[in-house]
């Protein structure tokens, strides 16, 4: 029954909308819940406004057979929320509500997500004044009452050189009973700016969705356009993209381990890793002139070749860096004082992580095998990626150790890629995009799975572009990890996730 | 303990010699653009129209580039297709006035040092509060880098502090989203007088890639009086450091106005 309703395809393919059955909402929700019960997770879920009502698309990832399931329905005004049965949908439904003014009935936590103007002239379901920009953080926060319970509010401006967000802790003494995270301060209206594209500015906007994941986001975007255009980038370009993605992972993981060490006051690793992170960024800059990989990944291929003396430079520098990185990182993992702070702090149960739909480092730290390079391989990874790193404890240590082991794995992968760099061109021209189609693209960025989805109109222009940064799923994980913790452990827990504010806010 | 000392010896001393010695930047690094001269009027107009962020303009077929709007794109169509400019390796870009960022002839006026009174107050100790107002975290990341041992910002008496009450100025990144405007202005108000404002990155100067977004402002310039502009998307840490040191008069004023060799395609 269900099988006929779900369209199945793989990462990197485009589906004509005409092939997508339009289900009524009851069938849609039944199929979605069946799929989730059968080990699928919600990779993306978004709406597109129609003349009458709202079309909803659900993209479900079946990790173990590498398939993506696709469901489509149409709603008008209000519809029964699926969040009570499927918690990983909670933010997706809140988004629809904020963007299009529809109401998911009986949603247990119906609050704004990003505090932007509604995309349609619809009634604001929270009754905020029409025509005025919403006030960020203006919502009913969850409150715990009691004589000795107090509330701690932090942000949007934080103490460090970091992005803004608001955190509201309900505490009993030092113990955190609940943390509510209210974001949206970085909202730049990215998805709306992409409509009618691709424009000349589009790729530059996507490079800055989350600046530290430039390669991850531009790779997802390029794969998406390539699948819509039905073209494949040259093998050499795919390998350079994969190399850059691993360099991005290396830089960020090394930086994160340093910052985690800094947060528990272990300064040698903090200082060494701060410098080493920059050295990995500098390698990316050798390749494309930008430490963050700006200008490298482009639809159709890559903008820069790893030519001349560069492969040799990379190999030589990496040989030194590898030794120094291992030395710097192992210091802190060998220190009992560090381990005492990492172990058992900010724990999440595997079942909870699965229910919330966590991805990336956070999911792999809870024993969930989720890695798009393994499950939804594309480009170079189709050649075989078989080293997903799994830790089972779900605590700060597990998330740190996933990083440490991934640093080692990425160094190995970068070495392999350098040794087996295919010859040939680095770019192929992109044809026109398929009309009235849907394409989905997944890419395992350093934080986790980056999912881009696009719908094209009858002229082959982008009619809806949906970005899901791994942070979108994982902020809820941080909230959960803080339950029952000391509030003084918040910086450590936060850093162990190191989520993106702008990737969430878009 | 012994392992830590051994590792410390192995990692070595890493603090750079900047500003005494110029930094060693990657060959492909894109810095100060050099504009082509004597471009045909049509090519000039095409180049101006090709920039998605309106960084180029022209009058009487003479090109001008606004480094506040320029993202130093690797695939700059004005450079690649119309031969209107090339990017040099010069990382020194920070300027004191908005109009100084517009490069139209051979001189690019780098940042001036503060006036004598301000220099007396801030010259030996400058504490900054950083506010990310819609930044993509690349500017923030490369400002954080200034605190690492390679750059060691503190050796120049400059430091990022946690509270605006402890700060002498504010370093803004991001285009200033509608949602961050209030918090940014509150933070600025909390800093004691006299105070500095530094706009770091293309977003904070003119909106960057988000210059056409209805959810963002076009940088901090319309909201606060800016004392230092640091161009780039994101600025290289040395660009930011060079700007800060020029502001504090710690870099020789000599190269402030430089004649450059011009590139003609």
Image (cartoon, coloured by chain):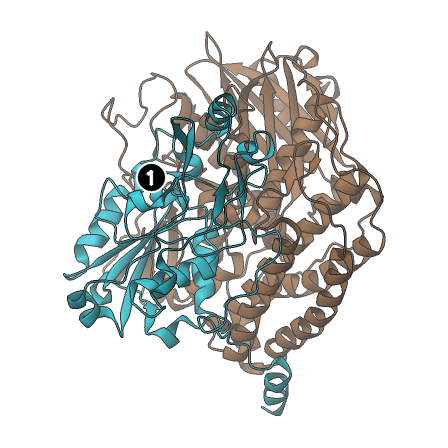
Chain colours: A brown, B cyan
Write down the quadrant of residue A424 in the picture: top right
In the picture, the quarter occupied by the N terminus of chain A is top right
In the picture, the quarter occupied by the C terminus of chain A is top left
Taking the image as shown, residue A483 lies to the left or right of residue A303, namely: left
User: Residue at (71%, 66%) from the top-left corner?
Assistant: A317
Residue A498 seen from this side: yes
Q: Nearer the viewer, residue A376 or A329?
A: A329
Q: Nearer the viewer, residue A208 or A119?
A: A208
Q: How many marks?
A: 1
Taking the image as shown, residue B100 lies to the left or right of residue A211, namely: left
Q: Is residue A452 above or below residue A430?
A: below
User: Residue at (25%, 22%) from the top-left corner?
Assistant: A131
- Secondary structure state at the residue bearing disc 1: loop
Where residue B56 sits in the image (x, y, percent)? 43, 33
Q: Is residue A45 above or below residue B157?
A: above
Q: Is residue A335 above or below residue A84?
A: below
Where residue A375 sits in the image (x, y, percent)? 75, 42
Residue A153 seen from this side: no
The chain carrying label 1 is B
Where residue A20 sits in the image (x, y, percent)? 67, 15
User: Residue at (63%, 54%) from the top-left corner?
Assistant: A284
Q: Which residue is mark 1?
A: B177
Q: Nearer the viewer, residue A287 or A73?
A: A287
Write down the quadrant of residue A392 in the picture: bottom right
Question: Counting other residues with Cα less than 10 Å from the Cα at mark 1, is it few (<14), some (14-19), or many (20 or more)?
Answer: many
Where residue B80 sits in the image (x, y, percent)? 60, 34
| Farthest bottom residue in view | B2
Taking the image as shown, residue A48 lies to the left or right of residue A28, namely: left
């Amino acid at each position: 029954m269900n099988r006929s309703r779900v369209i199945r395809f793989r990462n990197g393919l485009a589906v004509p909308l005409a092939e997508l059955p339009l289900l009524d909402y009851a069938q849609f929700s039944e199929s979605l819940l069946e799929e989730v019960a059968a080990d699928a997770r919600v990779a993306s879920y978004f709406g597109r406004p129609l003349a009458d009502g709202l079309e909803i698309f659900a993209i479900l990832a079946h990790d173990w057979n590498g398939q993506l399931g696709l469901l489509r329905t149409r709603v008008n005004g209000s519809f029964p929320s699926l969040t009570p049965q499927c918690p990983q949908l909670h933010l997706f439904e809140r988004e629809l509500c904020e963007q299009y003014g529809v109401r998911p009935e009986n949603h247990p936590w119906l609050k704004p997500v990003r505090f932007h103007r509604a995309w349609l002239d619809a009634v604001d379901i929270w009754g905020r004044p029409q025509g005025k920009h919403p006030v960020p953080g203006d919502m009913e926060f969850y409150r715990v009452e009691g004589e000795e319970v107090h509330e701690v509010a932090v942000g949007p401006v934080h103490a460090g050189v970091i992005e803004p967000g608001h955190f509201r802790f309900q505490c009993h003494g030092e113990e955190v009973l609940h943390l509510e995270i209210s974001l949206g301060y970085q909202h730049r209206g990215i998805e709306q700016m992409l409509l009618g594209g691709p424009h000349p500015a589009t790729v530059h906007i996507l490079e800055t969705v989350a600046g530290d994941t430039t390669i991850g986001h531009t790779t997802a975007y390029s794969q998406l356009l390539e699948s819509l255009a039905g073209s494949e980038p040259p093998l050499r370009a795919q390998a350079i993209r994969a190399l850059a993605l691993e360099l991005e992972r290396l830089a960020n993981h090394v930086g994160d381990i340093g910052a985690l060490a800094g947060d528990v006051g272990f300064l040698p690793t903090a200082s060494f890793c701060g410098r080493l992170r920059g050295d990995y960024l500098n390698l990316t800059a050798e390749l494309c002139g930008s430490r963050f990989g700006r200008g490298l990944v482009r639809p159709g291929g890559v903008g820069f070749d790893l030519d001349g003396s560069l492969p040799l430079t990379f190999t030589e520098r990496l040989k030194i860096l590898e030794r120094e990185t291992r030395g710097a990182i192992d210091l802190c993992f060998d220190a009992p004082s560090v381990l005492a702070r990492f172990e058992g702090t900010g724990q999440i149960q595997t079942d909870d992580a699965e229910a919330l739909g966590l991805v990336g480092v956070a999911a792999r730290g809870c024993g969930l095998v989720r890695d798009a390079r393994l499950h939804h391989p594309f480009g170079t990874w189709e050649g075989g990626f078989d080293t997903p790193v799994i830790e089972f404890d779900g605590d700060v240590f597990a998330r740190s150790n996933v990083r440490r082991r991934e640093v080692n794995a990425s160094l190995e992968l970068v070495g392999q890629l350098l040794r087996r760099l295919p010859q040939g061109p680095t770019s192929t021209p992109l044809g026109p995009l398929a009309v009235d189609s849907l394409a989905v693209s997944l890419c395992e960025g350093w934080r986790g799975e980056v999912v881009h989805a696009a719908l094209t109109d009858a002229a082959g222009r982008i009619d809806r572009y949906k970005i899901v940064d791994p942070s979108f799923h994982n902020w809820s994980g941080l909230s959960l990890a803080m339950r029952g913790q000391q509030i003084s452990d918040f910086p450590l827990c936060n850093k162990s996730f190191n989520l993106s504010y702008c990737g969430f806010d878009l | 303990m012994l392992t830590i000392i051994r590792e410390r010896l192995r990692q070595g001393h890493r603090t750079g010699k900047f500003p005494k010695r110029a930094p060693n930047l990657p060959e492909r690094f894109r810095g100060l653009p050099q504009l082509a001269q004597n471009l045909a009027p049509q090519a000039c107009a095409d180049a101006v129209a090709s920039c998605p962020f309106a960084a180029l303009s022209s009058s009487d077929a003479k090109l001008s580039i606004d480094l506040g709007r320029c993202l130093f794109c690797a695939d700059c169509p004005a450079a690649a297709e119309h031969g209107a400019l090339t990017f040099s390796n010069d990382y020194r870009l920070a300027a004191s006035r908005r109009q100084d960022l517009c490069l139209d002839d051979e001189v690019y006026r780098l940042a001036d040092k503060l006036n004598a009174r301000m220099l007396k107050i801030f010259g030996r100790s400058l504490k900054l509060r950083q506010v990310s107002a819609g930044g993509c975290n690349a500017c923030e990341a490369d400002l954080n880098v200034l605190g690492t041992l390679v750059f060691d910002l503190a050796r120049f008496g400059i430091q990022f502090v946690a509270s605006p009450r402890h700060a002498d100025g504010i370093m803004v990144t991001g285009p200033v989203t509608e949602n961050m405007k209030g918090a940014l202005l509150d933070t600025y108000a909390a800093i004691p007088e006299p105070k500095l404002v530094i706009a770091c990155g293309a977003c904070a100067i003119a909106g960057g890639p988000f210059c056409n977004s209805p959810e963002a402002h076009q940088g901090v310039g319309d909201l606060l009086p800016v004392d230092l502009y640091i161009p780039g998307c994101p600025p290289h840490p040395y660009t930011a450091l060079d700007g800060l040191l020029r502001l504090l008069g710690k870099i020789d004023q000599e190269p402030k106005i430089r004649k450059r060799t011009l590139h003609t395609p």
